[in-house]
Amino acid sequence: MGRNTVKAWHYHHLQIDWWYLGLGVVEVVLYDNREESPTYQRKMVFKLGDSDVDPQALTAVVKIPQGVLHGLKVLTDTAHLFYITSETYNPNDEGRFKFNSDLVPHSWGNLEELTVADNDTRDFVPTNARTAMAER
């Protein structure tokens, strides 16, 4: 992925994601969209990646639970995201809200400078049933 690429907002009903950035730096945004959660509608923003490039970047693996909206913006010329999932990919489990949805109070910056995939410009509600936090 190249600088100013935005991937957002994704979420899953069943799958858990784990992210690790092997090259570069990204801004990660997590937004809790689980009504039963004590952190419902809270947003977390942090940099992930090479701390030699950006001292504020965390070199870590990030776990993203079901129902948490997640997105990222590439801050360096390139970035390599590695991710592992708890489930085999199922397109009926991956929900999306538009990257610039009013649901999440976040700005990715100047829209004219962003690279956004077509899938991230539309909404999709997964057909899989939602699994509550307590059930997982």
Image: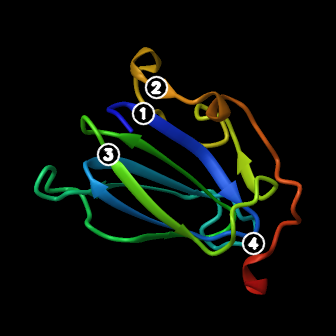
Q: Is residue 53 above or below residue 86?
A: above
For the residues marked 4 and 1, what is the alpha-carbon distance in whole angstroms?
Answer: 32 Å
Vertical position of residue 97 compared to residue 118: above or below: below
Query: Which residue bears the numbered disc 1?
Result: 5
For disc 4, the marked residue is: 36
Label 4 SS: loop
Give residue 117's quadrant in the image.
top right
Q: Is residue 52 left or right of residue 91?
A: left
Q: Secondary structure at mark 3?
A: loop
Mark 3 crowdedness (10 Å alpha carbons): few <14, some 14-19, many ≥20: many
Label 2's element?
strand
What residue type is disc 1 on?
Thr
The residue lying furthest to the left in this view is 52
When the figure is inspected, residue 16 is found, relative to residue 50, above or below; the finding is below
Contact between labelled residues 3 and 1, with CB atoms less than 8 Å apart: yes
Judging by the rendered image, the residue that carries numbered circle 2 is 115
State the scheme by which the image is colored: rainbow
* Residue on which the image places disc 3: 79
Relative image position of residue 40 (x, y in whole percent)? 65, 63
Instruction: In the rendered structure, find residue 58 and report the number of the disc placed on it.
Output: none
| Location of residue 75 in the rendering, given as x and y in whole percent from the top left corner | 29, 39
Residue in view at x 52 percent, y 28 percent: 116
Q: CA distance from mark 1 to mark 2?
A: 5 Å
- Of 23 and 31, the residue lying toward us: 23
**Pointer 2: residues within 10 angstroms few (<14), some, or many (20+)?**
some
Question: Around disc 4, counting alpha carbons within 10 Å, would you say few (fewer than 14), some (14 to 19), or many (20 or more)?
Answer: few
Q: Is 17 positioned to the left or the right of 98 in the image?
A: left
Q: Which image quarter is the C terminus in?
A: bottom right
Q: Left or right of 33: which side holds 1?
A: left
The quarter in which the N terminus is drawn is top left
